[in-house]
Every structure is written in structure tokens, then in C-alpha cells.
Image: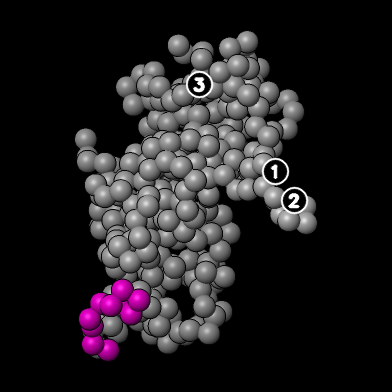
Amino acid sequence: MSEHLLEVKDLKKYFPIKRGFFRHTVGHVKAVDGVSFTVNTGETLGIVGESGCGKSTMGRMVMRVLEPTDGSIVFNGQNITDMSPSSLRKLRKDFQMIFQDPYSSLNQKMTIRDLIAEPFHIHGVQLSKSEVDNEVVKLLETVGLRAMDRFRHPHEFSGGQRQRIGIARALALNPRLIVADEAVSALDVSIQSQILNLMTDLRRQYNLSYIFISHNLAVVKHISDRVGVMYLGNLVEIATKQSLFQKPLHPYTEALLSAAPQPKRNVSRDRIVLQGDVPSPANPPQGCPFHTRCPKAFDRCRQERPVLKEVTAGHQVACFLYE
């Protein structure tokens, strides 16, 4: 097995709730509440869950765009959780991000050449003007665009082409880890498959690792090696994609998969309809965060919070049903 490139342990992010004239803190929104996982070199870890489950917040903490409330993030053997901005800047080139909206993530006033070359200037990469041009052309061709496109502006491209530009910019500094936050959700279905295939090819070519965040189960299944399922700021199940999609263990994962469309005509699942709404992360339930909607909940679920435990080889689940 590959070495762990990234190790996240008990990661938390609480946003304060302030009220009154003096803005006193009266509570916290527990957006991420104790998440632990690893990512191996050359691996794609998919993170899936409903909107508001904390998956994007978790991705931004891994990137240190958001400061964690608690927990640790170890990247390539170095603990970056409390690393100073100057020390973190030296490591920034090794982990990059692809954003959800390929339009707003690109400065509309800059040419494509300047957008892709910007990381070189920010990180002090010593290249001549001609060398920068050569690198930009190489990156554009790598993501399926033309050399002459570097003289154009983002508004002159389609959504899929703009996302290719975002990918080229993320690749500029030869990173080891890329966090893709809903990277294809804003694109047409036909364009989604092209971008996913491109990312898969780039992973092999550059030995990249991905954290691929999405609410689309089909997309996650296509690109991921392992999949983590999040609910209300918690990881409730992690497994290889084959194991997770063939034999989900957590009741929430079962409900998610039962609602997904089946591409094969003769394959179907019994639909599991969950009762009630997702609890507020500002006031999460005691015990298992899913017990208020779980059809299999019993007394212990209402009192204790389960932790991720390995049930079968490589398959972890946070559920008392398997103890």
C-alpha cells in the first residue's frame, strides 16, 4: 500500500453564533465535528453527502483556507495545522484547489496566459518570459486547449473550457495533492465526463492525489478509489468504491444509494425514504447524529456517539449495528 500523503485526525470546525448588541457568543455551528481520514499517494478519495453536511468546509480546512477549531492535518509528514503563514507558503505549491464555479474563480480582466503564470510569480519561481510562455503552452495543451488560447480572456470560453483553465492553473506548480470541490457540478453532463476523464489521465501522468468532493454519487463512483460518506459534519463510512457501492453498511449510505438512479435497466434498489429533516448543525442531537432519521436506531444510538471502526478489510463504519 502507498504511503499516506495526507493524514487528518479528529478535525473540527465550529463557527460562533453571535447575538445581541455586544455580539456575545451564544452557541456554535458545528460544521465539521471530528473527521478523520487518510489519503495515499496517487489515490483519489471521494467525499459525498447532502448539501450542508460539511464536506466543502472540510476541504477548505485541508487547504488551510479555513482555520480548524481542533484536530490535526499532517501533509507529507509535516503537521500543517498550526504552521505559520510564511512556512505554509513554502508548502502551498504541493497542494492546490479546483473550485466549483469555473467563471468566478478566474479573474475576468486577466488573459489566460497571466492567469496560469500567476502561481510562478506568487511563489517566486525564477523563469524568463519565454520560459513562462513555454510552460503556459505546455499546460494548456495538457488540458486539451490550444496554445493560441493563452491570449484570450475567461469570458471567451465555455464552462468546460474554463474548468480546464482552472485545472491547468492548479497543475502549474506540480502539486502532489489537489482538492476538487464540486469541480464538475456546474457543467453539462457531457462536459462532466470529459473533465473527469481528463482528471483521471492527469492523475496517472503526474502521480497526483485527489480529494474529490461531490454530492453526485455517479461522479464519485467514476473517479474515486475510496469513498467517504459525510452526514452532519461527521464521516459515517469509508470504504473502497467497490465495497461501498456493492455492500453499504451504514443506514445513511444505504438510503443515499437507494435514491440514486440505476444506469442498468434490470438493476434496482428498494427505495429507503428517510423521515424528518436533517438536524441543525447548531444543535446536533445527542448520540449518533443520524439516529433521529435512522429506521434501525435503538436506545444506545440516542445516548452514545459511534466512532469509525473497521468492520471488514478497508471498510470503516460509525454504527453500533456492527459492534
| Principal secondary structure, stretch drawn in magenta | loop
Q: Residue 19 has which mark?
A: 2
Q: Is residue 185 left or right of residue 174?
A: right
Hey, what amino acid is under mark 1?
Val
State the image coordinates of residue 100 (x, y, percent, origin top left): 53, 59
- Under circle 2, the secondary element is strand
Rate crowding at label 2 as few (under 14), some (14 to 19) or many (20 or more) other CA atoms within 10 Å.
few
Which residues are the magenta region? Answer: 120-129
Q: Is residue 80 left or right of residue 58?
A: left
Q: Is residue 251 left or right of residue 247?
A: right
Whichever of labels 3 and 1 marks the residue nearer the N terminus, that label is 1
Q: Is residue 272 visible?
A: no
Q: Quadrant of the N terminus?
A: top left
Q: Residue 306 has which mark?
A: 3
Question: Disc 2 vs disc 3: Cβ atoms closer than 8 Å?
Answer: no
From the image, state whether disc 2 or disc 3 is nearer to you.
Answer: 2
Location of residue 208 with respect to 164 vertically, above or below: above
